[in-house]
Image: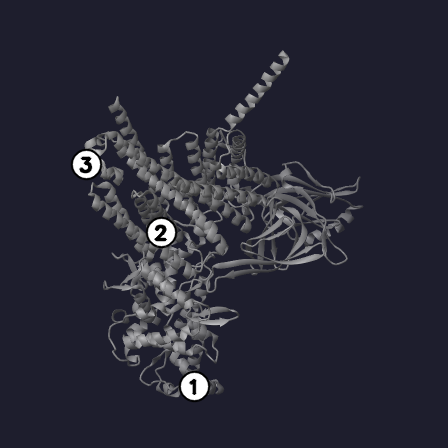
Amino acid sequence: MTSYRFLIAILVFLQVFLQVQLLGQTETASPPNPPENSDFSYFRSKQNGDIRTNEPILSNVSSRSGLETLEVAKLRDILIHDAGRVKPLAAYAKTTLLIFNGKTTFEANDGQKYSALAWLAHTLFEPEQALDDRIFKITFEDVFNALGISPHPSKRYSFTDLVQGIGTLQQLASFAYQKPESARNALDKELIRIYEAYILYYQLLSSFVYALPSETFYIPDDEVRALLSLSAERSNFSYLEMMEITEQLSAQEQLAQAKSEKTRTSAELIIIELANRYNQFPLSFGELPFRLFPSYSHGEERWFTPWQIFALNTSENLVTKEIFALKNIVTAYRAGAQYEFDNAVTEYKTFIDAKLVAPLTRTKATWELFYHSLDPFYHASLLCGFAFLSMLAFFAFPLRTSLQRYIKIGSTTLLLGGLGLIVSGLLLRVLITSRPPITNLFSTFTFVAFVTSLGGVWLEKYEKRGLGILTGALSAALLLLISNYFATDGDTLHVLVAVLRSNFWLSTHVIAINLGYGGIVLSGVIAHVYLIKRIYNQNPFQTTQSNVEKKPAAKNTSTKVLTTADGVTEREGKRAKHKNLQVNFKLIYATQGIGIIFTVLGTILGGIWADQSWGRFWGWDPKENGSLLIILWSAILFHSKFGGMIRELGFACGAVIGIIVVMLAWFGVNLLGVGLHSYGFTEGIAYPLILYIVLQLTVLFFLVYFIKMTERIQTLQKS
Amino acid sequence: MLARIIENTRLLRVRDMIEQIGQSLSSLKITVGALLLLWLLTFFGTLYQVEYGLYAAQQRYFYSWFFMVFKIIPVPGAKTVLLVLTINLISACVYRYRFEPKKYGILIIHYALIFLLVASSMTHYFAKESYIAFNEGESVGVSYNYYDSELTLWREAYDETGRISRDIEAFSAHAIKIGDPIVFSNYNVTLIPEYYHEHARPANFGAPDVASVSGLTALSYMKFPLEREQILPGGLFTVITEFKAATPQDVRTKLQSNQSNAQAQNPRIEYDRSSQTVRTEQKILLWEADPEPYVLETAEGPLYLRLQRKRYPLPFIVTLNDFIKEDYYGTEQAKNFESKVTLHHDNATQESRIYMNTPLRIDNYTFFQASFAQDNQGRERSILAVVYNTGYWVPYVASILLVLGLIVHFIYMFVARHVRKT
C-alpha cells in the first residue's frame, strides 16, 4: 500500500517537474501539463494524518492554524526573485493573490479577512489547509459548469473544487492554447488564466514541502528508524530530516547494496528504497516559483529555489543554514508560535542579507515596500477627487467671499497634496526600477495625471480664478482612476520588453509624448469649463443687475467683480464676463499649443528611435498613426482658427474632441492588436472607450445646443 | 511707346495672375481640407490594418495616389494629399508668410516640414528595404526583398577552392503572365505559367501528375496576406527542357539519374529523330515557401529551379558567427537579441555586434536586428533588416530643424509673456 502511494507521489512530482518545464514556454501552443489529477493524497494524507503530534514541541502550541493565530508582518521584507527582478515578499504576495482572487485581500472560508502576506504564508506553510481555501475567482458560468463545480455565491472556488474537473479544464485550456492569440475569446482567455493559476497554486503548495513530514519518507519500521538514528516516536519524516541523516543513510545503503539481492533483509530493502526516494525527491521540484537564495557566480547574481539547491546535491552545501532557518519558520508557523517564528524570520533575513551582492537590493526592496504601503496613486486620486468636488462647490453655489477663499485654499492644498503624492510615487518608481518614470501603460496614466495636475497648479498661479485647480484636479483624478484599471495585472514595476530597454529614449520620446497627451487633455478639460461658462454667461435671465448682485461669484469666479458688485452696471458686468471668457479661451489655446509642441517633439524623437531600432523613420504603424492623428487634429484646429473658419466656440469644441483623439491614440490603438508597439496591447477596454466617446460627444452636443439656444434667446430679446 | 505700355500691362497681368494663383494655392482652406483628409486617411488606414495587415494598408492608403472606396468612389491617397500639402506650404512660404519675430519659430517649423516632406518622399523612392536570414555559421552576399519575388534557375559547380559557385539566371515574378513562355536561354529551359498567384496558399485539388518539392499538388489564391511574411507567391508551371541526343538509347542513359529524384514525376519525353533533340515536359508546382529548390534532371546534370524573394547583391559578405537571445534572469521574457557578425569587405574583415537599438551602419547600408527563428533542431536563425539609403540623414536634419523651430517658438512665448508683464 505504501509503495503504491509512493509511486503515485513520485509520478506526481515527475509530472510537476515536466509541467513546470513546459510552463516556462507559455509562448508555445501546447499547454502545460497539469499535476497528476487522480490523486492528491500527498497533501490530503497530512490533513487526516497525525501531523500535529508529529512535530517537535514548541512553546505556545496552538491547535488553530497559523493563519488565525500568527502575525506574519515580519515576513514582508524577505527577498525573492520573481519575474526577472528581486522584490519583497509582501509585494509578491499582493500580485500573486491578485492572479487568483482578483483582490489584494484574502477572505477565508469563515468570512475572516486577511492580508495578502498572511494568505501567502498560510498557503506555503499549511498546504494541507490551503487546499480548501476558496481562492480561484471564476465568474464565467460556462467554466464551472464544464468543470462540474456547483456555483458558490462568492464566485470563488477551492483547489479541491478544481481538482474534480481538472481533466476537463486541461482539455479546454489546451484547445484555447492551440488558437492563435488574436483568435481567443474571453472564455478562452479565462480558461487559460484559470489553468495557469491552478498550476501556480500547485507550485505554491509544494514550495515548502521539504520541511514537512511526508508520506514519501514513511518509515513505520522501528529497526530502520534505529539504524538511521531517527526519532522513534514518529513514522513520517521530512526531506530535511532525511538530509540531516544523509550520511547514515548512504552508509546503510552501501551496506545493503553490498549484499546480494536474495539475502537482503526487509529493513535493508526499505533503506535502499528510502535512499532512492531521497535522491529522487528534489529532482521533482526543479522550477518552483520561489527563488529565495542569491548566489554570485559568473559575473552575475543568480537566485535559486531551495529545490534547485537540493538538486545541485553538492556535498558542501553553502546555504544549509538558510534552508534550516526557512524550515524553522515553517515549523514555528505551523505550531502557531509567534516568538519562535519572529526569531526564525529575523535569523533567516540576516543570513540572506549577508549574501546580497548587487548594490541597493535591500534598499530597493525597502523602497518598494514603502511604495506599496504608501499606495501613492490611489491616495492621490482621492485627494484630487476631493479637490475637484470642493472646487465644484466653489463654482456651483453662491457662497460668502470668506468661505470661498477658504474653499479655494483648501482645494489648492488638496491638489498640491495629490501632486506631491503623485511625484513621490513617480520618484519611487524611478528609484525602484532604475528606469524613467514611464515603463508601461499603467505608468503613462500616472505620469499624465502628474502633467495635468501640475499644469492645473501652474495655470492657477497665473490666472488665479480657480479654473486651474478645478480642471487639474478633475483630469488627474480621472486619469488615476483609469490607471488603476491598468494595474490589475498585478505588478506594475515589472522588467521591460527588449526593445524598450533604453533609458535614453524612454526618458525623451516617451516623456515628450506623454507631456503632449497631458497638454491636450488639459486643454480639452478647460474647454469643457469654457463651454459651460458660455452657456451661463449668455443666459439672458441671469445677466440682469439683480442677478449679478445675488450670485456673482457663481458664474464669474472673479472675486474682483464680486467685491465691486454693488457698483457694476450691467454693461461692465458683461465686459468682465467677456474678459473672463477670453482668459479662459487663452488657456485652452495655450495648453493646446503646449500639447502639440510636445507631441511633435515626441513623435520626432520616436521616429529617430524607430530609425535606430527598426530601420525606418516612419512606417504607418498604428501607434505612429495615433500620434499623427493628434498632431493633425491639433494642426487642423490652429489653422482653421487662423483662417477664420472656426471661432472660439469651434476651437473649444475641437479641443474637447482632442481628448477623444488622444484617447484613441493612447490606448485605442492598443485594442487593434496589430503593429510593432506590441508591448502595450490591452483588451477589455473597448466598451469603456466607446462608451466614453459616445458620452463625450453627447455632452458636447448638448453644450453647443444650449449655447446656441441662449444666443438665440439673447438676440430675440434684443430685437 | 504704346507697345511698351501694352507689354508692361501684360507683364503686370501675368505677374498678377501668378500672384493670384500663388495666393489661392496658399489658402488656409486648402491646408485645413488636406489635413482633415489626411486625418481620415490615417484613421481608416490604421483600422484597415486590423483586417488586412500593415502592408495592404500602406499600399492602399499611404503609398497610393488614388484608391477606390466601395469599388466606385475614388479617394485621394496619402501621396496626393501630401503633395497638395507640400504645394500649399511652399506657396504659403512664398506668398503669405510675413517675417515677424513673433513668427520665427512657427516659420522654421514650416520650412522644416517642407524639407521633411520633400526629402522623405525622395527617400521613399530611393531607399531599398531588404532582409537577410541566416543560421549561425552561414555567410550571405545578398539580401532579399520583402515583397518582390523572382524565378531563378542555376547549376552548381565547384571551383578550385571547393566552394560552390552558382550561375543564377533570374526572371522577375512581376513579369510572369499566364501562358507566356519564360525562357532561360543559358540552360535551354522554358517555363510556361499555368497559373500564378502573388499570395498563394496550399490547396488540395491538384492533378496527380504535378511535381513539387513540398509534395503539394495545387495552390490557391489568398486574398489578404496579413503579414509580409505571408506574401508567398506560387504557381504551376509547365517546364520544358531540350537537349541533343544521338539515339533514343542515349536519351535513356542521359535521363537515368531521374530515377533517383524522388520528388519528380516522370516527365513526358519526346524524341525528334530529324533534329536529334529530346524534349521533356513536366508540370512543376513552385511555391516560395518550398524549403529547397526543385531539382530538374537534365542531360548535363541537375539544374535547380526556385521561386524566391528578389535578391540584392551586397558589396560585402556577411557571416553570422553567433546569435544570442538573452532572457531576463529567471524568466522567459526576452531581454536582448544580438547577432555577432563578420563583414568581409574588400579583403578586410570587420567584426560587429548588432543588437536592440544598436544597428550596424556601413556605406549607406544599415543592418538591424529584426527578428529571429529557431528550427526543429534548435538551430538559431537570425533575421536582419537591411536598409540601403543614401539619405538616411534626411529625417535627422529635418527633425533638428523642427525641434529648433519648436524651441524658438517656445522661448518666444515665454519671452513675450515676460515682456507683456513688465
Rendered position, A531 above or below B342: above
Q: Secondary structure at mark 3?
A: helix
Quadrant of the image containing the N terminus of chain A: bottom left
Q: How is the image coloured?
A: one colour
- Output the chain of dot 1: A
The answer, for residue A550, to whether it is visible in the render is yes
Q: Which mark is residue A483?
A: 2
On the rendered structure, is A311 left or right of A379?
right
The answer, for residue A5, to whether it is visible in the render is no
In percent of width and height, residue A195 lies at 38, 59
In percent of width and height, residue B82 lies at 52, 35
Mark 3 or 2, nearer chain start: 2
In percent of width and height, residue A30 lies at 46, 58
Dot 1 alpha-carbon crowd within 10 angstroms: few under 14, some 14 to 19, many 20 or more:
some
Q: Dot 1 corresponds to which residue?
A: A248
Q: Which mark is residue B137?
A: none
User: Could you tell me the amino acid type at mark 3?
Assistant: Lys
- Output the chain of dot 3: A
On the rendered structure, is A625 left or right of A151?
right
Cα gap from disc 1 to disc 3, whole angstroms:
97 Å
Of A699 and B10, nearer the camera is B10
In front of the other: label 2 or label 1? 2
Establish whether labels 3 and 2 are both on one chain: yes
User: Could you tell me the amino acid type at mark 1?
Assistant: Gln
Q: Secondary structure at mark 1?
A: helix
In front of the other: label 3 or label 2? 3
Q: Dot 3 corresponds to which residue?
A: A550
Of B233 and A328, nearer the camera is A328
